[in-house]
Image: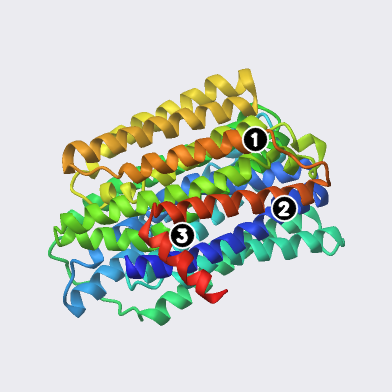
C-alpha cells in the first residue's frame, strides 16, 4: 500500500483544495453572481456532457488501464497507445455528423420544457469531447503511476478557471453567454494541458501494427462503454431529467445539495486514481492475496475517512444552510440521502476496479444496464411527483441496489469481500457520534458554530480511530503528523 498511501494522500489534499474552491463557486459565487435559471443551464450542459462522455471516449480510458501492463515490448505498447488515441474518433465523428444534420430536431426535443437550452445544445457535444480526451490522457499518466498532476487538473484547474470567470461576470467584463462559452473553453484548455503532460511522461510513437489481442481489446472497450455510461447515468441523469421535467432553476437548487454531499466521495476519487492500475496489475498477475489485502484496506480506509466527512457535513448542515440564499435551503434531506449513497460508495473500496478489470465484467454490465434503466424510470416517476426530492430518492435507490449487486457478485465469483471487524467498529463509531452531536449547537454565528463543532468532532473521531487502531495506514499517518507537530 506504500505507493497507494503516498499518492492517495497527495491526491486527497489536491482534491479537497479543488472541492474547497468548488464550494465557494457553488455555494456563494454562482448563487449570488448569476440568476438561478442560468446556473441551472450551466449544470444541465455539464451533466449532459458527462452522460455522453463514456460514449465519446469509446471506453478507452478503462481499456488503457486494463491492458497496458499486459504488453511487454516497445512496439506492442506503442501500437496499443496509438489505438487508444484514435479509437474514440469512430464515435465522435458520426455523432457530430448526426448532431449537425439533425440539430433542429434534437434541440427542439431537449428544450421543450426549458427553451433557454436550445441555443446552447452544441456546447454539450464540445464539452463531452473535452471530458473524454481528458480522461484518456489522464489514464495515460495513471498507467505510468503518475496520478498527482492529473488529479490537480481534474479537481483544481477548472474550478479556479470558473472562479475567475465568475468574478469577470460579476464585474461585467463578460456577459452571461460569454461566461458559458468560457466555462467550456476552460475544459478544452484543461484537456490540452493534460495531453501535453501525458506526452511528456511518455512520448507517443504512432504505430499501427496489429496487436495479438486486438479482438479482445475491441470487445472489452465496446462493452466497457456501457459500464462507463451506467456509472455516469446514475450520477448525472437526475440533473438532466430535472431540466427535462421541471423548471431549469431547480437544477441549480439540486446541484448545491448534491455538491455538499459529494464531498464525502473525495477520498474515494483520490484513491481510485492509483488503485485502479494496481488492481489491473494484480489481476493480470493473478495475485489474489494481494488483491484481497488491497480490497479490504481500501474499503476500511475510505469508510473511516468518508465517515468523518459524513459527520462533519450532517452535523453542521443546518448551520451551513443559514449562510446561503434562502431559495437554496430546501435540500437538507437531499444531502442526507445522497451523503449515505456516497458513504456506501466509500465502503465499496476498489470493487469497481476489480470488476471492470476482471473477466466477469460482461455480467456486471448486464446488471448495470438493468439498474440504469431502473434509475431512469424512477426519475421519470418521482421527479414530476416529488420535484428535486424525487430525483434524490431515485438516485439513492439506484446506487444502493447497484452497489449491493456488485458486492454480492465479487463475493460469489472471486470469494472476496471488503469487510472486517474494524468495518463494524467504524460503523458503530459513526452512528454513536452522529446521535451524540446532532442536537448540540452553539448560540453563535453559523461560521463560528461550524468551526467549533467541527474541531470537537474531528478531535474526538481521530482520537478514537487512533487509540482503537482501526487502520494501520491511517494510524501511521496520524503518527507522522504528531511527530511533525
Please indicate whether residue 60 sits to the left or right of residue 182 in the image: left
Q: Which residue is mark 2?
A: 451
Q: Which residue is mark 1?
A: 438
Residue in the image at 72% along x and 51% along y = 452
Label 1 sits on a secondary structure element that is: loop
Q: Which residue is mark 3?
A: 270
Classed neighbour count for the residue bearing mark 1: other residues with Cα under 10 Å, few (<14), some (14–19), many (≥20): few
Quadrant of res 250: top right
State whether residue 137 appears in this view.
Answer: no
| Residue 353 or residue 226, whichever sits in front | 353
Please indicate whether residue 353 sits to the left or right of residue 313 in the image: left
Residue 247: x percent and y percent? 71, 30
When the figure is inspected, residue 148 is found, relative to residue 41, above or below; the finding is: below
Quadrant of res 24: bottom right
Residue 12: x percent and y percent? 50, 62
Q: Which numbered disc, 2 or 1, marks the residue that appears first in the sequence?
A: 1
Label 3 sits on a secondary structure element that is: helix
| Callouts 2 and 3 close, C-beta under 8 Å | no
Picture quarter with the N terminus: bottom left
Label 2 sits on a secondary structure element that is: helix
Figure disc tally:
3
When the figure is inspected, residue 59 is found, relative to residue 315, above or below; the finding is: below
Picture quarter with the C terminus: bottom right
Residue in the image at 61% along x and 63% along y = 17
| Callouts 2 and 1 close, C-beta under 8 Å | no
Amino acid at each position: 500500500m506504500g505507493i497507494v498511501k503516498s499518492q492517495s494522500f497527495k491526491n486527497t489534499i489536491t482534491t479537497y483544495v479543488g472541492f474547497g474552491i468548488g464550494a465557494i463557486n457553488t455555494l456563494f459565487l454562482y448563487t449570488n453572481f448569476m440568476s438561478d435559471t442560468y446556473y441551472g443551464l450551466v449544470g444541465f450542459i455539464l451533466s449532459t456532457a458527462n452522460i455522453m462522455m463514456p460514449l465519446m471516449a469509446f471506453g478507452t480510458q478503462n481499456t488503457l488501464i486494463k491492458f497496458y501492463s499486459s504488453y511487454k515490448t516497445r512496439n506492442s505498447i506503442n501500437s496499443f497507445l496509438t489505438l487508444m488515441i484514435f479509437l474514440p474518433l469512430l464515435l465522435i465523428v458520426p455523432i457530430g455528423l448526426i448532431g449537425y444534420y439533425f440539430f433542429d430536431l434534437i434541440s427542439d426535443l431537449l428544450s421543450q420544457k426549458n427553451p433557454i437550452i436550445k441555443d446552447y445544445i452544441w456546447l454539450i457535444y464540445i464539452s463531452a469531447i473535452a471530458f473524454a480526451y481528458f480522461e484518456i490522457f489522464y489514464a495515460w499518466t495513471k498507467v505510468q503511476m503518475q496520478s498527482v498532476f492529473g488529479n490537480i487538473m481534474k479537481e483544481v484547474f477548472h474550478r479556479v478557471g470558473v472562479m475567475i470567470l465568475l468574478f469577470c461576470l460579476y464585474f461585467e467584463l463578460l456577459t452571461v453567454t460569454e461566461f458559458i462559452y468560457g466555462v467550456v473553453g476552460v475544459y478544452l484548455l484543461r484537456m490540452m494541458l493534460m495531453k501535453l503532460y501525458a506526452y511528456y511522461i511518455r512520448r507517443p510513437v504512432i504505430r499501427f501494427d496489429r496487436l495479438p489481442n486486438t479482438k479482445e481489446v475491441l470487445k472489452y472497450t465496446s462493452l466497457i462503454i456501457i459500464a462507463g455510461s451506467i456509472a455516469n447515468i446514475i450520477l448525472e441523469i437526475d440533473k438532466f431529467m430535472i431540466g427535462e421535467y421541471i423548471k431549469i432553476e431547480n437544477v441549480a437548487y439540486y446541484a448545491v445539495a448534491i455538491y455538499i454531499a459529494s464531498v464525502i466521495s473525495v477520498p474515494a476519487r483520490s484513491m481510485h486514481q492509483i488503485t485502479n492500475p494496481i488492481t489491473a496489475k494484480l489481476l493480470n498477475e493473478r495475485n489474489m492475496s494481494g488483491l484481497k489485502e488491497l480490497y479490504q484496506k481500501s474499503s476500511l480506509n475510505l469508510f473511516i475517512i468518508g465517515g468523518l466527512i459524513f459527520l462533519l457535513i450532517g452535523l453542521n448542515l443546518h448551520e451551513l444552510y443559514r449562510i446561503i440564499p434562502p431559495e437554496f435551503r430546501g435540500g437538507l434531506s437531499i444531502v442526507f440521502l445522497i451523503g449515505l449513497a456516497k458513504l456506501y460508495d466509500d465502503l465499496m473500496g476498489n470493487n469497481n476496479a476489480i470488476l471492470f478489470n476482471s473477466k466477469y465484467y460482461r455480467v456486471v454490465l448486464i446488471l448495470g444496464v438493468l439498474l440504469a434503466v431502473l434509475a431512469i424510470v424512477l426519475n421519470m416517476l418521482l421527479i414530476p411527483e416529488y420535484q428535486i426530492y424525487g430525483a434524490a430518492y431515485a438516485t439513492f435507490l439506484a446506487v444502493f441496489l447497484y452497489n449491493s449487486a456488485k458486492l454480492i457478485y465479487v463475493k460469489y465469483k472471486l470469494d472476496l469481500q471488503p469487510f472486517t471487524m474494524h468495518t463494524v467498529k467504524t460503523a458503530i463509531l459513526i452512528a454513536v457520534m452522529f446521535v451524540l452531536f446532532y442536537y448540540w449547537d452553539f448560540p453563535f454565528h453559523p461560521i463560528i458554530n461550524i468551526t467549533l463543532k467541527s474541531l470537537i468532532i474531528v478531535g474526538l473521531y481521530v482520537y478514537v480511530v487512533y487509540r482503537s487502531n482501526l487502520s494501520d495506514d491511517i494510524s501511521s499517518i496520524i503518527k507522522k503528523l504528531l511527530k511533525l507537530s
